[in-house]
Amino acid sequence: MESKGAVKMDHLDRLEAQSIYILREAYKKFGKLGMLWSIGKDSTVLLWLAKKAFFGHCPFPFIHVDTKYKIPEMIAFRDQMAKEYGLDLIVHSNEAALKAGMGPEKGRLVCCKALKTDGLQQVVTQYEFEGLILGIRRDEEGSRSKERVFSERNKDSEWDYTNQPPELWDQFKTDFPKGNHIRVHPILHWNELDIWAYIEREQIPVVDLYFAKNGKRYRSLGCAPCTGQIDSEAITISEIIKELQNTKVSERAGRAQDQEDSYAMQKLRKDGYM
Amino acid sequence: MSTKADREVLNIVVVGHVDHGKSTVIGRLLFDTHSLPNGAVEKVKRIAREKGKPFEYAYLLDAFEEEQKQGITIDTTQLQFRTAARDYVIIDAPGHKEFLKNMISGAANAEAALLIIDANEGIQEQSRRHGYILSLLGIQKVYVLVNKMDLIDYSAEKFNYIRQEMNAFLHDLQVYPLKYIPISGFYGENITVLSDKMPWYQGQPLLKAIDLFEKDNSLEGKPLRFPIQDVYKFDHRRIIAGRIEAGTLQVGDKILISPSQKVTTVKSIEHWVDKDKQDKVTAGMSVGITVADEFFNQRGEFISHLENPPLVTDTFKVNLFWLGKKELVKHKEYILKLATQEVSCEIVDITQVIDATTLASIEQAKQVKLNDVAEVIIKTKQKICLDAFKNNQHTGRFVIVDGYDVCGGGIVSGLAEQIQSKSTLNDQEKHIEISCFDEYYYVLAENTVKKVFGKLRAFKTDDILPVTGQTYEYPTDFSIIDLQHKWIAWVKNAKLRKIVDLAAYRYLGETLIETSGAGIKVQSETEFQKFIQALDSIETGVVNAKFSNQWLQFGKFKTVRYIENLTAENLEYYI
């Protein structure tokens, strides 16, 4: 391709530049760093941004907390991408909880806590991660909107959201007692439409569960028993974008655990949920 | 098809005193621009119902349990809405004083601000403090919303009074609000359309007015500042990575790396996917370059062009706000972070502490307390690169870390190379300022005598003192008298032992000097008593020339050396 002079940065360019800056800060600051990859669109964009930040390399492991309840297509996509990109992939399940029969019928929040929050905590403890990169966004739901870009968790992964230190001018929290870890959120400032516009522009491969089949598609991905589909005819990315520009339904409306009570996500996240 | 990528996005922060109606105004903006997902309104209505309260626009923002219990916003919330002209990210910053750190975190990312004042209550403590913080954060684009106009019967007179009062305050801070808009968030007056209750108002309603904020794109035209974030060697390439904070950079440009002062040329601008290949990069981009000469480069160094380099210094004047629970004090070690630099620093002088609500200043304060704003002089352990904030916002601002947390931040107002800060001797409550370890040179190039300050230090008891310098030599056992406080510091084997009151001191024949290093003409117990009498008899308490000429001998331990010229390496400060 012809090389070009400096173009004026558009909105997506700015979002991308900021995310790359954050990823590079995390890589510089944390010896033990990993990235959570949920196979969904957001963390797949994050994976793409990491490749850009490090010029085609992925200098840290990727972690998938597998609840064993995931939609099968997600697992197939995970394995295919990991091979294609040559990822150092850690797949972990909370085997003890699964053996004891944990599942959504025990209560959705109980199940999320055991298979996702506790599963993640086990990985953090086992690999002694100091930094964990996650693809959450402020516009997803209330408790995520109040996150810092670098957000501290104690040794039990608990989040003290009432007493967060100031975060300004891209000077992030990088000092903390041993045993704690920092959750790094490089796409916190993106919204759902930004994600799709970027996927379209960059032609990033995503799992095809997002595209409509027989009048239904997934808008947000999670475990099969707790994730609903929406009515949709969108079979291309631009059709998804058009659909989202006109919807007034929230992105996570199909995620059953969020609807358990008014503060479900806040409660989950305080204990270390993603 | 129009996607988000084509549209401009503006970050706006909403600040103001607690209960002046920020959340209501933001709730209104979201509601009136149809920006709320169905789920959000339903959820808030459900919560309101569960709690037996009527629905309010303000509740839309209070997603957290605790907030609803206390009725205050505890953290910064970011919400998005769009007008026909562009997209907005709105940052709701808490008004409560305890949450100033959250207000600052939110406001630091803003390009424009709405400052809300309750028409009925008028300007309150946080209105002023927030105005001050906006000026410290360099946010120049400000509208003042005079809210709750319904409570003052939509009175033009009261509105004008608030405008005058607030203007008087903000103009002192060099903040010039672009507009004052009278509104009622609760009733939606002057939000989307002009209110018929305030026909006297000649401006635009809020939603039209915000589209008039102009986005600042001036960084590209400024001198190049490219702080090195990291250096990668993942493959055969040695890539210097970082974000261009200002200016533009092209392949082939000759560049200067500061503070090491190395010069080289840009060989390539690196990329991963083909479509990102480019020969020229500009402010705001996160990039990676390779250079012609493979020096050892490291994080924190600044790349600039040869002309217009950054300032390289270790002592500078700043304005800062302090958010730490522990006070900011002089001579304690802190970490300063500026762009990608991270360095130990100390506060060498607190010039003044400013009461952010009245702008009254306290001179010679000993400390800066939680939520104070102050003017101080910072000295870093190594020289760092920076710019005055007025020249470059991104490389003229910094944060201070105390322990694990960012506890303050501020902006660089300028260099402080000619300050007269002094080293000190310290023993519990007694602190003696000394200049006895300064050096004196006769500079041949300038035909004049210059004093070079020693490295600024705070010596404690048992610290070794630099008793021999290039232009002075004291014995290893001696005492230093502070004539002003009438204290005496006892030095043995070149170590500071203790500081005692002169009255409690018994002379045993040792060498005595004064804090500037002048020898005191005392050889015996009798002469010492006469010296003390002479000192006590100075009525003004300030040592005069007569006393000095009688008792002090300036050149006894000091001399003046010749030097060709003063260079940056051989001095810390000079006068």
Image (cartoon, rainbow, N blue to C red):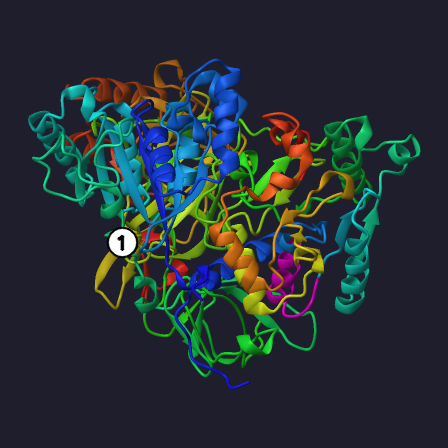
Instruction: Tell me the element at label 1.
Output: loop
**Residue range corresponding to the magenta coloring:** A43-58
Disc 1 residue type (three-letter): Lys
- The quarter of the rendered structure image containing the N terminus of chain B is bottom left
Asked whether residue A251 is in view, the answer is yes
Query: Going 78% across and 62% down the picture, which residue do you hit?
Result: A82
Q: Give B385 or B283, whichever is nearer the viewer.
A: B283
On the image, the x and y values in percent for residue B394 come to 38, 55
Name the residue at the right extreme. Answer: A99
Main secondary structure of the magenta stretch: helix
Quarter of the image holding residue B120? top left
Mark 1 belongs to which subunit? B
On the image, the x and y values in percent for residue B299 come to 55, 60
Q: Give B507 or B290, whichever is nearer the viewer.
A: B290
On the image, the x and y values in percent for residue A52 come to 61, 66
User: In the rendered view, does A70 fall on the left or right side of B377?
Assistant: right
Quarter of the image holding residue B107? top left
**Badge 1 is on which residue?**
B390
On the image, the x and y values in percent for residue B270 come to 56, 75
Label tally: 1
Q: Give A125 or B77, whichever is nearer the viewer.
A: B77
